[in-house]
Image: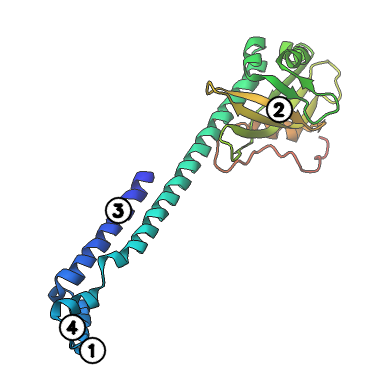
Amino acid sequence: MVRVVSMRVGAFMGSVAARGKCHCGEPSRCPQTALRQKAGELCHPALSRREARKHACGSPLEAAPMLRFLFLAVLGTTATVAHAQTAETSRCAVWQRELSFAASVERHDEKAFAEHIESDAVFAANTARPQRGRAAIVKQWKSLLEGKSVRVRWYPAWVVQAGDPSVVLSSGPALLENLAPNANPRYTLIAFSTVWHRGSDGVWRVMFDGGDEGRAATAQDVANFETGRRAQCSPDLVSLATLDREPAAQH
C-alpha cells in the first residue's frame, strides 16, 4: 500500500515537472503559455522576448511550495498507513495469543498458562481483592486449571490497540460451567477484559485481567457462545455472543 501511494504521487509530481518544462521551454506546444508570453510582450514593451517568457512562465522556484506540500502529504499518508498496518498486526497477534491462553486452561496445562502471564501481573484487577504476581494468580486458578469441579472457556470478541503499540486490550465472553450433577445454574456468562503487554522479547503476556460478576446463562446464551468463537481476528470486531442484553427467558 505504501509503495502504491508513493508511486502514484511520484507519477503526479513527474507530470507537474513535465508540464512546467512544456510551459517555459516549448511555448509553441502550450497555447496558454504562448498567450501569456504574448501578453507579457504587449504589456511590457521594454522587456526582451526572453524576459517576457520568464514573466509569463514564472520562476521554477515558484513550484517549490507545492512540491514541498506534496512531499509532506506523502510522508503523512505513509505514516498513517504504516501505523494502521502495525495496529492490525498487533491486534491479530493478541487475538491468537488470547486463544492460546484459553487453550492452556482447556488442556489443564499449568506451565503454558503461567507463560502467558507477566511476572508482576494483576488479576481480578477490578475487585477489592486482586491477585498480584504470577505465582499468586496460578495458585488462585488451580481449580480452574484442574477442571474437575468447574470448567471455564473464553475467547476474544474485541481487540483494540492503544497509542502505545506494545499495549493491546482484549475483551469478550467467558463461559463458566459448574460440573456438579445438580448445579443450578450450570452455566454462568461473564464479560472479561484483558490488557496485554508485549515484552522486550517480543512475546505478548497478560498485564491486567478482570471481568464482571457474571449472570446465569440460558440455553440460548450457551448456543450463542458456542457459535461466536472465531479462530481468526475479524475487522468488524463483532461477536455473535451478546453480553449486554437483557437475560432471555428461561427455556
How packed mark 3 is, by other alpha carbons closer than 10 Å (few <14, some 14-19, many 20 or more), is: some
Who comes first in sequence, dot 4 or dot 2? 4
Q: Is residue 12 left or right of residue 112?
A: left
Residue 109: x and y in percent read 65, 11
Q: CA distance from mark 1 to mark 4?
A: 9 Å
Q: Amino acid at mark 4?
A: Leu
Q: Nearer the viewer, mark 1 or mark 2?
A: 1
x, y percentage for residue 160? 61, 38
The answer for how far apart the CA atoms under marks 1 and 2 are is: 76 Å
Inspect the image, locate mark 2, and give the three-letter code of the amino acid beneath it: Phe
- Please identify, in this view, whether the residue under mark 1 or under mark 4 is nearer the observer: 4
Work out how far the residue at label 3 is from the one at label 1, CA to CA, in angstroms.
Answer: 37 Å
* Residue 133 quadrant: top right
* Residue that appears at 77% across and 43% down: 245
Residue at image x 23%, y 77%? Answer: 55
Quarter holding residue 25: bottom left
N-terminal of the pair, mark 3 or mark 4, is: 3
**Number of numbered discs present?**
4
Whole-Å distance between the Cαs marked 3 and 4?
37 Å
Circle 3 is placed at which residue position?
10
- Is 28 in front, or is 43? 43
Q: Helix or strand or loop: what does disc 4 sit on?
A: loop
Q: Could you give the CA–CA distance between mark 2 and mark 3, rounded to whole angstroms?
A: 46 Å
- Depth check, mark 3 against mark 4: the one in front is 4
Q: Does residue 87 lie above or below 116 as drawn?
A: below
> Is residue 29 visible from the viewing direction of this image?
yes
Task: Report the residue marked by disc 1.
Answer: 43
Residue occupying the point 64% across, 10% down: 111
> Crowding near pointer 4: few (<14 within 10 Å), some, many (20+)?
some
Asked whether disc 3 touches disc 1, contact meaning CB atoms under 8 Å apart, the reply is no
For disc 4, the marked residue is: 47
